[in-house]
Image (cartoon, grey):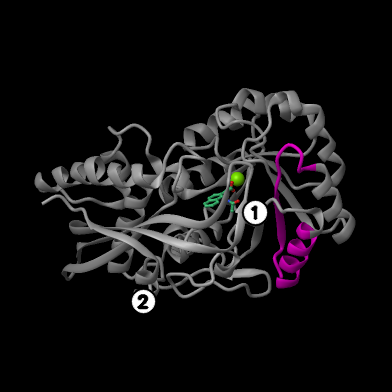
Amino acid sequence: MLIESVELRELRLPLVSPFTTSFSTQTERNTLVLRVAGSVPTPNGRVDVVGWGECVALGEPLYSPEYIDGAKRMIQLYLLPMLARVQAEGREVTAETVGALLEKVVGHRMAKAAIEMAVLDAELRARGESFARYFGATRTRVPAGVSVGIQPSVDALLGAVGGYLDEGYVRIKLKIQPGWDLAPVAAVRQQFGDEVLLQVDANAAYTLADAQHLRRLDDYGLLLIEQPLAEDDLVQHAKLATAMSTPICLDESIESAKDAADAITLGAASVINIKPGRVGGYLEAKRIHDLSRAHGVAVWCGGMLETGLGRAANAALAALDGFSLPGDISASDRFYREDITEPFVLRDGHIDVPQGPGLGVEPIPENLARVTHDTQEVWPA
Ligand SMILES: CC(=O)N[C@@H](Cc1ccc2ccccc2c1)C(=O)O
Ligand SMILES: [Mg+2]
């Protein structure tokens, strides 16, 4: 692709209800969307094309070190100028090379992932290929799990879980933290039975000193416990894994295929939550899928409250063979009254995988405008 212009849009989407995790309570999703325009070579000559990318960083560095303002500056001041220099030397940027071209910048994987996603979307739209087909997806719809925030009371939690089960969600994930873990899990089991697929996510709220307490979760037949300890605690997760029978799943700790290899080798994870935005892009996400599959480690697709753009790409990725557990690919209305794309809706507990070229979706201009907080043209002159 020869990039001709890049637009950075900071969005603010109000959440349908406050979303409380062990690290924050959010009432809106502050996010970053990239629109890359340029041309792509095809057998019949160059075609003009537009690609969309989404940066999953939060407004503040509470989930991981990246945050929206930092990502905007990183993209504008470092990453795009590096690609502009590649083009100035007469070379094209392709999705498969973006990661390597940006390697000199250490970290900032969410910022890099947004650029790679937009370039991949543009290239695939130009050749009429969907993300699903490009990744080798074997399914046309994926089972939808739902992430349930920490609630003001156990009764409120049971109401929320009952509502999601009524909507058809096939898997329930409860956010937990010290003081809100055994009681909510026991209440959900008591109210909805042992058959419901149930898992918990601590977002790194515990330490190894809590091992004996966390072990008590083993009585509730959970699918997994996600990121109980700090993101840099691989060795401690491995120790915790020997102290409890509930499978350990890592999220924040896995930022690359290398991290996944280390976690698997150390026995720190027997399940991995793959989030393309967190690991530097969909190509790295595929590599982690392939690596995990080779080790017999189950993977599922996590969510970062993406708009329909990231949701579309996640659904395509989640349709790969190795994604054997329901992911956090909920319907758009789990978080948003209005999405910036056509909404993803739950159908028999599943989300349909877009089949159109590229992402298969694009922003609805009026919807996008309504939630755009600021827009910047950022392609170096
Ligand atoms: C669906 C889910 O639980 N996602 C993350 C947590 C998360 C991720 C991104 C967020 C953005 C704004 C507000 C809250 C957010 C929570 C997780 O699996 O750990
Ligand atoms: Mg998580």
Asked if residue 49 is positioned above or below residue 4 in the image, the reply reads: below
Q: Is residue 348 left or right of residue 74?
A: right
Give the residue type that dot 2 points to: Glu
Q: Is residue 193 left or right of residue 139?
A: right
- Identify which residue, 160 or 296, lies in the foreground: 160
Report the magenta residues as a range.
156-181
Residue located beneath label 1 in the image: 324
Q: Residue at x 57, y 66 (%)?
A: 139
Residue 366 badge: 2
The residue tagged with tag 2: helix, strand or loop?
Answer: helix
Q: Can you tell which quarter of the image residue 53 is in?
A: bottom left
Q: Is mark 2 within 8 Å of ligand 1?
A: no
Q: Is residue 44 left or right of residue 24?
A: left
Q: Quick check: can you spot residue 140?
A: no
Mark 2 neighbour density, 10 Å: few (under 14) some (14–19) many (20 or more): few
Asked if residue 377 is positioned above or below residue 70 in the image, the reply reads: below
